[in-house]
Each structure stands twice: as structure tokens, then as C-alpha cells.
Image: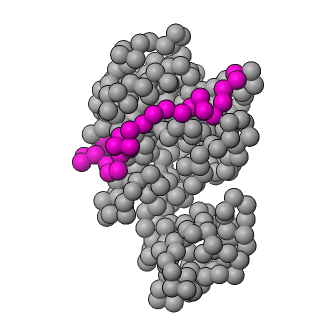
Amino acid sequence: MVDAAVGFRTSDFEYDLPPELIAQTPTAVRGDSRLLVVRRGDLPPRPATEFTASHFADLANLVCPGDLLVLNSTKVRHARLLGRRASGAPAEVLLVHPATEGTWVAMGKPGSALRLGRRVDLGDGVAIETVEELAEGYRRVRLLGATAEEAMARFGRIPLPPYIDREPTPEDAVRYQTVFAEREGSVAAPTAGLHFTPELLRLLEERGARTARLELEVGPGTFKPVDQEDYTRHSMHLEQYDIPEAVAAAVADTRARGGSVWAVGTTVVRALESAVNEDGGVRAGRGETGLMITPGYRFRAVDRLVTNLHLPRSTLLMLVAGFAGYEVTRAAYQTAVRERFRFYSYGDAMAVI
């Protein structure tokens, strides 16, 4: 639910980020990242110097007994496939999600490699053929000589985000997954969850907090910039989610006991808010969401947020500004830049409380 009178433009979500602050690799040890603690809705915003910069493990001191942390347990597919066109020129294909009749929705680089009827040869008799051109650069493709799952197992690579300027390594196959990842379904990681370790999860539970897991299949649209000044005209790509009965029940129980519901990541926010009733209850089941959250949105399911530091002009940054307040978010990002926090997927985190 958005207040149309808020009056922001896409350029209001621009900020200056030195390129060297874009994290190109994970921290040497999982969880050894920083945490910027932001107070939600402080008006006027606290001076930027008063934001608390701490270690991510200090999150355990912010979560209270009886609180619930909701995690996105989706796993990243090895969905990036490198091959060659008929001309011998290189091409790559990103398998996004299954479609109909054994086909998949995919994206190609360059896009011309996946024009209707063309093939990309992966080797050993395996190829990808385009059977339909879809909107916004998407294609429907079929695998020849192997199933998609077999092709990803044999040839697939972890699809690192476009702002990581290197090829993936064996370490990325581990570090670009959360420790609680379960079923493959995404082409990008729910990055707020990358900071969690088994030790931190145990500590949170020992202190009386609970965790629950849902799935939202993160698609490439998460990296799509908002390229219009009127962001209400931005087209959000649909993403599938699955909220188990146990999660819906845990949210209801937490509310009844007076605890706070923590969303670990913007994907969890979008899943819960897409399935929430007017009374704050969450409906269990599968669904798809194209929900775009911006300042003026009234949150009904989520009380606290753990998230990474996001791209300028992105829907993810707009969501955080909607949750924390625009001026608070702007001041927090200025602090993060000044204090040399690491940004984006392999970067540091923020807790909005």
C-alpha cells in the first residue's frame, strides 16, 4: 500500500559510491562482516555519526527472546552456461526458471545469440536452442542432448552478480550460498543470509529467538535498474515464493506473544508482505510476487530488517527507504560510505530496528 503523495523520483535514490567499496570477494571468514545498526523511523534522523557500526555477530544482541527471524532458504543454481554460436563466437546462457513442455526461460549474452531458432553449443553433444522470444530480452529455450539439470551439473557455473568483475572460483560455489540453503531455484543469492553462520544461528536460538524458513526464487530482475524518473512505471519481474504452514503459524505466534518479526533480506520482506492479510496474518502457500515497495508503503508483516547495502536507483534501496524512512536511509548510506563499508552482494550488512 503506497501513498501516492510521497512525491519521490528515481533520482532521489542516487548516491555517490567509490568503486573500490563494491565488494569483489567475500570476507576471508563467513560472518566476519560489519553491521550498521539503524533506528527505524527516527524523525528527524539521528546525526550520521550516531549510527552504530559493529560486527555482524552482534546481531544476537539486538534480537530479543521471543523474536522470529525469517530466512530465505532458496539455493542458487549453477545456471550460467558458456558455449559457442554456430559462427564459433562465444556466448553464455542464463537459465532462469522452468517453463512449459520441458523448456526454460533464459537470457543470453549477447542477446543475438538466442534469436529464434539459433543454438548455443555447450560441448559433448549438448546444446541450447531458442524456441520463443519473450519480452524484455527473455527467451524460451530447450536443451538438446541433456536435461537442464544435467547440463547445469556438467557445465554450469555460479552466476555471480554483474558488478563482480571476475570469473567465479570454487570458493564462490560455497560462499555465494547461505549455510541454510536447501532447494535450488534462484539465479542470485538472498545476500543478507550470507552473513549467518551455524554458530550464530545456534546462539540466537539459545537466547530465545526462533528461526523459520521460506523460499523466494530470486531472479535476474533483482539487478534491473530503475531507468525512469517515475519509478511507479518500473516493471517488476514476477518471482515465485513458497511460505510453509509452519512459517505462517510462527509469525502469528510471535505476534500474539508480542515479539518482533525479523525479515532477513528484502526477498523475505516481499514474500511476507505479498502474503499478508489486513490483520497482519500471513497466508501459507505458493504464490508469485511483483510487489514494489517504496516510501509510503505500510508494512503489516515485518517489524525488523537485516539487509545488505544496495545499488543506487534500485528497487532494493527503495524498499529499505520505505522501511527505515527516506532521510534515515540517506544518512545511513552516507555513513556507510564514509566509514568504508563494503557494498552489494559480498558486502557488509545493515540492521534496521
| Magenta highlight: main SS | loop
Asked if 108 appears above or below 29 in the picture, the reply is below
What's drawn in magenta, residue-wise?
Answer: 6-31
In the rendered image, residue 168, in percent from the top left (x then y), is placed at 37, 62
Q: Residue furthest left?
A: 28
Q: Nearer the viewer, residue 139 or 285?
A: 139
Q: Residue furthest top?
A: 44
62 horizontally vs 78: left or right? left
- Residue at point 75%, 25% (across, down): 4
- In the image, residue 15 lies in the stretch drawn in magenta: yes
| 219 or 328: nearer the viewer | 328
The residue furthest bottom is 125
Q: Toward which corner of the image does residue 196 lie, by quadrant?
A: top left
| Residue 311 coordinates in the image, percent (x, y) | 50, 40
Q: Position of residue 92 (x, y in %)?
A: 51, 71
**Residue 281 in which image quadrant:** top right
For residue 151, above or below residue 45: below
Residue 225 location (% of width, % of height): 59, 46
Residue 347 magenta: no
At horizontal 40% and vertical 54% (from top left) the residue drawn is 164
Q: In the image shown, does 147 or 212 lie closer to the viewer?
A: 147
* Residue at x 50% of width, y 66% of height: 79
Q: Is residue 191 above or below residue 331?
A: below
Q: Residue at 60% of width from left, 65% of height from top?
A: 107
Q: Is residue 116 left or right of residue 50?
A: right
Quadrant in the picture for the N terminus: top right
